Structure formats: structure tokens, C-alpha cells
Image: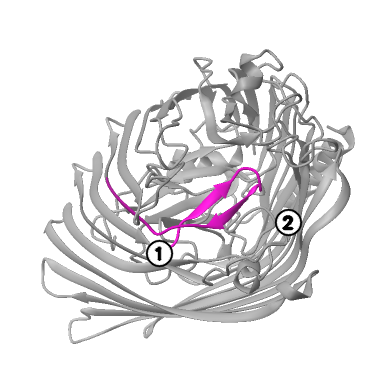
């Protein structure tokens, strides 16, 4: 890390702290709401598979990467097959979500999933997040909520940052493998306005033998806000810049033949860089007639990524390295108006609209060697516009029954300008998605749910106009612009003495077309229809005011829903996921968190003749704090597991191997045990 980054951040923060002290002198500070541990939402939820996780829970999680906060969603697995700056790989409900397809993510009302992205449809990179600034994480699963649109067949999450930072803080982190982190955050009042900010810089080399990751990340969040919980507005600016080198997945035979170690690399010139800048606004108003909310945003985004999954399979002389590039501007917004009617206010209405426009200046795929472009496979400019409208009615049928009926309509338009004119064109599509839930309250603490609905994901715009494969020159089939899913679930939520809450859900989902990762192309492509069903059981128990226990279990069965000679198993569909945690937070300042999570073996190809071995990892955090000081020690991969973070099965070619290559498992192991220590001062 460059020392100038630390010096600049510290100087900026100290000036802000001085201004804060002067501006706040003699003023009463508004109380900051910090949401607590996982909530079941009995009496509020619209389906069995939704909940809220607050900052108090997130703060006690030892994190290897920012993306790990998504594992707060019960049943979610977050892994990495590349460098620290790349989007994580995610798994949920029998989906290999790749980098976010079929799971929608929003931050402060801004969509994170990228359409028609250079690396994969629905690409979800949350490395720009600063975990300490997240006030709440609200999640849902399944396509049962009218406000959920694109990429939400498996569910979605809304992450909301603080309107007001809970305190002024300086936090320093040091650890093995060159880990360095500086976080500066705080706020200042100017009469009725509040200005908050957070700045973070991070460096990391990683444990790899043949390559240092050389992570150089800097990101910031700045907000100007006004109002209370019911009526408020907030302007948010975010900036993020990251560069890294990466050790990608490696073939098992290269390790067996002692060509490289499990921590080795076959191509040491891989990596990438990414930047993101956004400006967004949120407005909330409450009146006697109802409440409304408005969101607007503009995002400037750029990514450049070099990968090599097959080594010498396609080009035995210059190698198979390729570059993926994405440069775009996104703007859009959403609005919702909610009101009640009826003699006893038994009807609650919600009417909403979403608009999004992706102006993709360049999305490209290039052959490369040592990060130098050799030639262009495909380079496009894309304009993609979507408009969604929805209506939802909640009806209190009686003292114990309530129902929710929703209807959503989405319209998409694609305009593709390709370097090969034959692949240019425009396309449009629309889809209507009905939603329904019926809820029975056994008591104030226990409810049963039946939910059903239709969801969808959009496909890459380039696939909707393609005529010739840009790599082979052969005719190519176009994909459907929008792919529907249909799901249902029955479930139960309950709480006991305000100490234990749990949920149980039996769910089913059909998808008209699966998106699968293709190893030798480094992207996803549309595939066959599929069906999934499964069972989830989630538990949170606050044993007392100090100790808490979590235990979540998820089982699923996933298959292609047609007949094909290669088989009907879905590669990457994990059948069983389990996670557990023991958490302690003593009033004398001591705190700790022990977390363990396991996912079972899963098929790597359609006939299930190749499987992963399954993986288990544990993390530990121990610390002490008072009103001003906090010290925390994180032990990541506590038991030094050498299980695999991720596995694929495909053909690659090493030096001296046949021209057709060798089909093999390609994997990346967990990063070995490492320790990180954090020192924080609040004022």
C-alpha cells in the first residue's frame, strides 16, 4: 500500500473531526437507531422466507471479504474462485448463482446486479461496501414480492446504509499475508442537516505461492441527510477504486503431478481493476393519506479483468488468456406510494414503479497474453432500458387471516451495436408476474404462510440479437430476452419469549431456462429448463443478554426438467448447507463470535459422474471494548481447512498434453488460517 493513501485519509478525517467538534458544541445529538440481531418479522412478513439482519449482528462477524456479509442471509454460501477484487461466487436454494444471477441485490435503493456485463449476466460486485456503514440487511427468498423484478427468482436483499453514523471512529487493521486496513468514519451536524462520511483503504497480498494479489483498494461513502425515521431525505455519494492480481482456480492434475502446489498458479499475469462512482437520493414522506418513497441514482462503472481457465487448449502458442472489459453509465429511479382504506383500514395498497437505463459504452471480450490484447473476439455498445410497474394489496381478512395479492409488469428494450454488424440489432420483450400470499396467525408469535409467484431474469442483450458466434463464426441461436420462473412455498414463523425465533419453509421453483457457467469461455450461457425444491429450517436463540446461538439448515434437490443424453443434474447445485454460530457480548466489554459453515458435495457435470468433495470452514472473533476503545482478533479458517472454496469440471490443456486437452476438476482451496487484529477508537 502506498503510505500517501493513509496520510490523505487521516488528514481528511482529522479535519472533519475538528469541524464536528465545533459544529456539535452545545447541540443535542439525535439518537442513532442501530438495528439489532436477526429478526423473524412475525406479524409483518409476507412469506416465511424473509427477515432482517442489523449492524449489531454484522459487527460480530469475522469477515475475509466484504461479500461475506451476504452470508447473513440464511442458507447463502459466498465463495471466491479468483482475486479479492472480483465479485464473489454465490450459492442459494440449489442455485449456483455465479456472480449474482437470480439473486437481486440493492444498496441504498441502487441495483447492484449488472445486465449484459463483460463477465456474466447479473454480475454482483459489493466490494465497494464498507461493512461498518450497513445499518440493515433485509432479505427475501423466492419470487413472491411484487417489488422484486429482474434477477430475483431465488430472492433478493436490500442493504441500507446509516443516515447518521453511530459514532466517529478510527479503525486500523493489520494481519498476515500483507493485510492492512484503515477505516475513518463519522459525522457532523449543521443545524437540521447531518453530514456523514466513511473512508476506507485496504491492501492485501494473499497466501499464494507464485503471485501476490497486490490489492490496492480505496473507497468512500458520504451522505447528507435531514429528518427523522418517518420523514427524511438523504443524498449519498460513493466512490470505489480497486486493482489486484489474482490466483484463479487450478487443475487437480497439476497438483498431483507436482507442477504447482495447491496455492500455486499456472498463469501469474491474471488480475483486474474496477472502479465505481455513484450519486443517489432517497426521500421518505408520511402523511395522513399515506406514505411515499422516491429513489434516484446515477452510477459510473468500469471493470477490466484478465482470466485464463484453459491455458493452452485454444492457442497452444500464445495461451488462452482473455480480457473482459465493461464501461457503462447507469441511471434510474423508483417510487412507491402506500395507503390504507376500508372502514377498519383493513386494506393496504402499494403502487410502485422502477426505471433503469444502462448506457454501455463498451462491453468486450479480447484474446490476450500477459495482459496485452492480441485481438478482439467481440466488442459491443449496448443500450438497455427497463420499466417496471407493480401493485400490491394486503387485505386483513379477519383477526387471524390476511392475504397479499400482487401484480408486476416489466418491459425491456435492447439495442446492440456489435463490431460485427451481423450481430447488431434491437429487441424488446415484456413479462407479467402475479404474486400471492395467504397468512394465518395462530397467535401473536406464530404464523403460517402459503406463497406463490412468478419471477424472471433478463438475458444478456448480446444474446438476443446474435446470429454468428464471434469466436467460431458458426450460426448461433438467439436467447429469450426474459426468462420466467414460477415458485411456491409453505412455511411457518414463530418466536418464543422474545428469545428464540425460527422459520421453516418447504419451497418449489421452476425456471424456463438455466444460466450455467462455461469454464472455457469464462462466462454464462442460457441452458435447459430446470426445477428445484427444498426445505429450510432457520433458528436464532438469544440465550440471555450475553449469549446467542444461530443454527440454519437448507436442503434442496435441483434437476433439469427435460430429457437429454448427458443427464439431468445441474452443475454447481449444492444439496445441503448448514451454518451455526455462538455469539457472546458481555457488559464488561468482552465479546466473541465463533461461526462454522458447511456445504455438501455437489455435481460438477450433468451425469453426476464428477462431484466436489464438500467443504467446511470455521472463523473466530474475540475482542474487548468500552465506550471509546475496541480491540478485536479474527482467526479466519480457524482449523486451517484445506477444503475447496469452489470446484468446476471442464477441459484444459497443459504443456505436452493432447490437443483436445484433459477433462479435470479445477478448484481453489480455502485461504489458509490467518490472523487479523483491529484497533478502533470512537469519539
* Mark earlier in primary sequence (2, 1): 2
Q: Which residue is mark 1?
A: 512
Q: Is residue 202 magenta?
A: no
> Which percent across, then down, holds residue 422?
74, 75
Q: In front here: 75 or 181?
A: 75
Marking on residue 364: none
Q: In front here: 662 or 612?
A: 662
Q: Which residue is mark 2?
A: 471
> Which percent across, then down, holds residue 244?
77, 38
Q: Is residue 526 magenta?
A: yes
Q: Residue at x 73, y 39 (%)?
A: 308
> Which percent across, then down, holds residue 502?
24, 43
Q: Residue at x 58, y 53 (%)?
A: 524
Q: Residue at x 72, y 32 (%)?
A: 181
The N terminus sits in image quarter: top right
Alpha carbon distance from label 2 to label 1:
27 Å
Q: Element under label 1?
A: loop
Q: Quadrant of residue 670?
A: top right
Q: Tell me if 414 is positioned left or right of 276 in this view.
A: left
Number of other residues with Cα within 10 Å of mark 2, as a class: few under 14, some 14 to 19, many 20 or more: few
Q: In front here: 333 or 374?
A: 374
Residue bounds of the magenta highlight: 513-534
Q: Quadrant of residue 511?
A: bottom left
The C terminus sits in image quarter: top right
Q: How many marks?
A: 2
CB-based contact (under 8 Å), mark 2 and mark 1: no
Amino acid at each position: 500500500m502506498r503510505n500517501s493513501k493513509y496520510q490523505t485519509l487521516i488528514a481528511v478525517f482529522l479535519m472533519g473531526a475538528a469541524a464536528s467538534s465545533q459544529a456539535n458544541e452545545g447541540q443535542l445529538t439525535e439518537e442513532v437507531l442501530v438495528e439489532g440481531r436477526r429478526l423473524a418479522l412475525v406479524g409483518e412478513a409476507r412469506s416465511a422466507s424473509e427477515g432482517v439482519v442489523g449492524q449489531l449482528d454484522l459487527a460480530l462477524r469475522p469477515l475475509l471479504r466484504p461479500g461475506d456479509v451476504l452470508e447473513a442471509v440464511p442458507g447463502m454460501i459466498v465463495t471466491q474462485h479468483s482475486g479479492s477484487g472480483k465479485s464473489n461466487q454465490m450459492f442459494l436454494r440449489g442455485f449456483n448463482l455465479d456472480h449474482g444471477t437470480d439473486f437481486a441485490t440493492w444498496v441504498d435503493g441502487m441495483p447492484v446486479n449488472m445486465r449484459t456485463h463483460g463477465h456474466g449476466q447479473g454480475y454482483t460486485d459489493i466490494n465497494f461496501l464498507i461493512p461498518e456503514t450497513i445499518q440493515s440487511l433485509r432479505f427475501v427468498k423466492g419470487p413472491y414480492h411484487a417489488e422484486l423484478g429482474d434477477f430475483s427468482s431465488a430472492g433478493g436483499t436490500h442493504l441500507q446504509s446509516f443516515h447518521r453514523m453511530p459514532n466517529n471512529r478510527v479503525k486500523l487493521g493489520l494481519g498476515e499475508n500483507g493485510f492492512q486496513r484503515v477505516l475513518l468514519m463519522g459525522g457532523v451536524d449543521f443545524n437540521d442537516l447531518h453530514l456523514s462520511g466513511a473512508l476506507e483503504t485496504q491492501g492485501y497480498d494473499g497466501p499464494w505461492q507464485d503471485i501476490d494479489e497486490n490489492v490496492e483498494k480505496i473507497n468512500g461513502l458520504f451522505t447528507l441527510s435531514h429528518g427523522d425515521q418517518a420523514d427524511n431525505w438523504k443524498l449519498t455519494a460513493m466512490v470505489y477504486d480497486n486493482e489486484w492480481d489474482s490466483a484463479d482456480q487450478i487443475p487437480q492434475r497439476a497438483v498431483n503431478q507436482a507442477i504447482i502446489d495447491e496455492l500455486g498458479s499456472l498463469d501469474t499475469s491474471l488480475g483486474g481493476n474496477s472502479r465505481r462512482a455513484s450519486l443517489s437520493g432517497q426521500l421518505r414522506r408520511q402523511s395522513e393519506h399515506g406514505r411515499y418513497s422516491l429513489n434516484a441514482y446515477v452510477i459510473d462503472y468500469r471493470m477490466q479483468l484478465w482470466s485464463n481457465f484453459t491455458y493452452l487448449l485454444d492457442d497452444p502458442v500464445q495461451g488462452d488468456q482473455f480480457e473482459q472489459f465493461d464501461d457503462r453509465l447507469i441511471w434510474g429511479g423508483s417510487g412507491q406510494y402506500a395507503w390504507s382504506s376500508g372502514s377498519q383500514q383493513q386494506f393496504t395498497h402499494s403502487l410502485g414503479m422502477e426505471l433503469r437505463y444502462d448506457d454501455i459504452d463498451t462491453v468486450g471480450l479480447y484474446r490476450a497474453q500477459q495482459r496485452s490484447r492480441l485481438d478482439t473476439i467481440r466488442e459491443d455498445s449496448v443500450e438497455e432500458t427497463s420499466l417496471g410497474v407493480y401493485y400490491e394489496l394486503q387485505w386483513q381478512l379477519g383477526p387471524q387471516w390476511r392475504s397479499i395479492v400482487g401484480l408486476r409488469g416489466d418491459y425491456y428494450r435492447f439495442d446492440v451495436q456489435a463490431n460485427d454488424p451481423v450481430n447488431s440489432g434491437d429487441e424488446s420483450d415484456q413479462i407479467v408476474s402475479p404474486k400471492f400470499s395467504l397468512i394465518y396467525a395462530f397467535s401473536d408469535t406464530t404464523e403460517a404462510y402459503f406463497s406463490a409467484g412468478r419471477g424472471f431474469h433478463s438475458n444478456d442483450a448480446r444474446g438476443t440479437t446474435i446470429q454468428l458466434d464471434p469466436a467460431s463464426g458458426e450460426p448461433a441461436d438467439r436467447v429469450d430476452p426474459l426468462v420466467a420462473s414460477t415458485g411456491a412455498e409453505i412455511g411457518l414463523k414463530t418466536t418464543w419469549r422474545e428469545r428464540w425465533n425460527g422459520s421453516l419453509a418447504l419451497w418449489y421453483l421452476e425456471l424456463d431456462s438455466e444460466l450455467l457457467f462455461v469454464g472455457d469461455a469464462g462466462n454464462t450461457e442460457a441452458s435447459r429448463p430446470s426445477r428445484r425444491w427444498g426445505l429450510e429450517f432457520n433458528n436464532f436463540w438469544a440465550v440471555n443478554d450475553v449469549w446467542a446461538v444461530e443454527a440454519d439448515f437448507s436442503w434442496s434437490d435441483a434437476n433439469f426438467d427435460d430429457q437429454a443424453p448427458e443427464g439431468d443434474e445441474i452443475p454447481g447445485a449444492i444439496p445441503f448447507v448448514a451454518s451455526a454460530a455462538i455469539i457472546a457480548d458481555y457488559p464488561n466489554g468482552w465479546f466473541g463470535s465463533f461461526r462454522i459453515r458447511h456445504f455438501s458435495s455437489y455435481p460438477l457435470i450433468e451425469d453426476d459422474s464428477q462431484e466436489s468433495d464438500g467443504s467446511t470452514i470455521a472463523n473466530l472473533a474475540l475482542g474487548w471494548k468500552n465506550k471509546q476503545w475496541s480491540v478485536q482478533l479474527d482467526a479466519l479458517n480457524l482449523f486451517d481447512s484445506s477444503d475447496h472454496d469452489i470446484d468446476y469440471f471442464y477441459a484444459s490443456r497443459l504443456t505436452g498434453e493432447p490437443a483436445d486437452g484433459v477433462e479435470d476438476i479445477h478448484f481453489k482451496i480455502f485461504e489458509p488460517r490467518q490472523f487479523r487484529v483491529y484497533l478502533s477508537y470512537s469519539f
